[in-house]
Amino acid sequence: MVCNNCTLGKVTVIGAGVVGLTTALLLQQRGYDVTIVADHFPGDKSIEYTSPVAGARWKTLAPNSDLRLQRYDAVSFNIFWELAKTHAAEAGIMVVSAYDYHEKCDENVLNPWWKTLVPTFQTIDKKELPDQISVGYHYTTVLINPLVYLPWLLKQYFALGGKHRKQKIDQISDVISDDTDIVVNCTGVRAKDLGGVMDKSITPTRGQNVIIRAPHIRKTISMSRPDSYTYVIPRCDGTVILGTTKDTNSTDHNINKNTTADILKRAIECCPDLSLSYKGIADLKVVGNVVGIRPTRKGGPRVQNEYFKLQSGKQVLITHNYGHGGSGFQSSWGTAQEAVRLIKQGNNALRNDTKNIRKLLSRL
C-alpha cells in the first residue's frame, strides 16, 4: 500500500543500516513523506556498512539497572517474535534454542531482567556446565539473517512509497534545506566524525567473525569469559556465524588469520557439534571471514531531538538515533519506535509555534 496522503512532513533519514531502515519504515507507515539518504544500501559491501555483517540475534546486553535499554530490547524481541510467526522465511528469521554460559557472575547474570520475557527460560544445572563456567541458561530466541532481512525491510519501505538516494554525507547540513521538515540521524559509527554532530562518545569497535557451512546446527550458543566472548549463530541459509572480537578504537578492515584461528578454536570448544564427525577444526567448512565496526557509545544509543535553524528562519527538527554498539538488531524496533514518538512530539511543537506566530500576526 502506497502512502498517498503523506502530510505529516518531509523526512530525510540518513543511513540505511538496520536502525535507519527500521525507523524509515515506521515513519512511512505513519504517514510521513520519507527519503533515505545513504552511501550504502542492502547489497553493498563496505567496512563502513556494519549491519550486513552483524551476528544479528536477540540477546540483550541491557543491564538490570537501565530501564531505557530494557524497553528498547523488549519491544524489539516482541516484534521479531511476531515476524517469526508470519514472515519468517521471507524476512530471514529463525526461532531456535539458545544457551548462554558465563564464567564470571554479577547480578545481571544471576538474575537477568529478561528471564520472564523470552520463552522457556531455565537455569542449566551446574553438573551440566562446561569447565570454569559458573552460570548457564537455556531459552528460546530469534536469529536474523541480515543478508535477507535488510533487503526485506527495504522492500516493505518501498512498497509504502518510500524513496531513497545514494549520497555520501559529510555534514548533517548537507541534507537540510527549506524543503526539509525533519532529519533523522541514523549514521552509526559515522556520527563520531559527521559535521554538525561530532559525537566524541562514539568509539569504533572492530569485530571479526568467521562464516562456516553447517546446516545441521539449529541452536545458538554464547560463552562469556573475562578474556573473550564467543558465539555460534546459525542462519536460515545453512551458514553459521562464529565470533567474535571486540577491538576498541580499531577500524582495520583486514582479516587477521591468527584471529580466525582463535575464533575457530573457541567456537569448536563451546560447540563440538559444529563438526558432524567430531573431528574438530579440521572438519569445519569455512566459507568466509567478515569484519564490521560497531558504533559503541558511552551511555548507550542516543535517541534525542534537537533543532537546526536555517538562514530563512525555518526550524528543522533533527532526531538522532545512533550509537547502538553491538545491539543494533536487538534494539532496532524499540529505538525506532522511540525516535518516531520524539519526531511526532518535536514536529507538533514546531507546528504549534508556527500556528501561534500566524495567529499573532493576524491580529496586527
Image (cartoon, grey):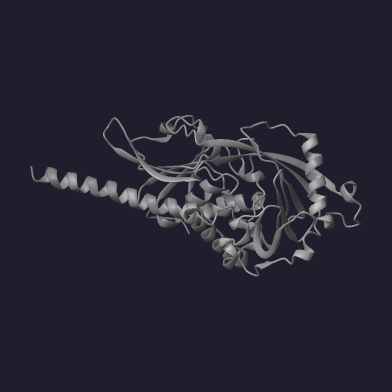
Q: How many marks?
A: 0
Furthest residue toward left: 364
Front position in the image: 81 or 163: 81
Confirm whether residue 7 shows in the render.
no
Residue 137 lies in what quarter of the image? Answer: bottom right
- Image spot of residue 286 (x, y percent): 82, 45
Q: Is residue 283 left or right of residue 255?
A: right
Query: Which residue corresponds to the image point at 29% horizontal and 30% vertical from the top-left?
Result: 311
Front position in the image: 108 or 353: 108
Q: Is residue 253 left or right of residue 132?
A: left
Front position in the image: 206 or 15: 206
Front position in the image: 208 or 166: 208
- Image spot of residue 244 (x, y percent): 71, 44
Residue 208 lies in what quarter of the image? Answer: top right
Up-down: is 167 above or below 93? above
- Image spot of residue 192 (x, y percent): 51, 33
Please identify the quadrant where the C terminus is shown: top left
Q: Is residue 64 left or right of residue 133?
A: left
Query: Which residue corresponds to the image point at 27% horizontal and 48% vertical from the top-left?
Result: 351
- Image spot of residue 129 (x, y percent): 77, 61
Query: Which residue corresponds to the image point at 90% horizontal and 46% vertical from the top-left?
Result: 282
Confirm whether residue 48 shows in the render.
yes
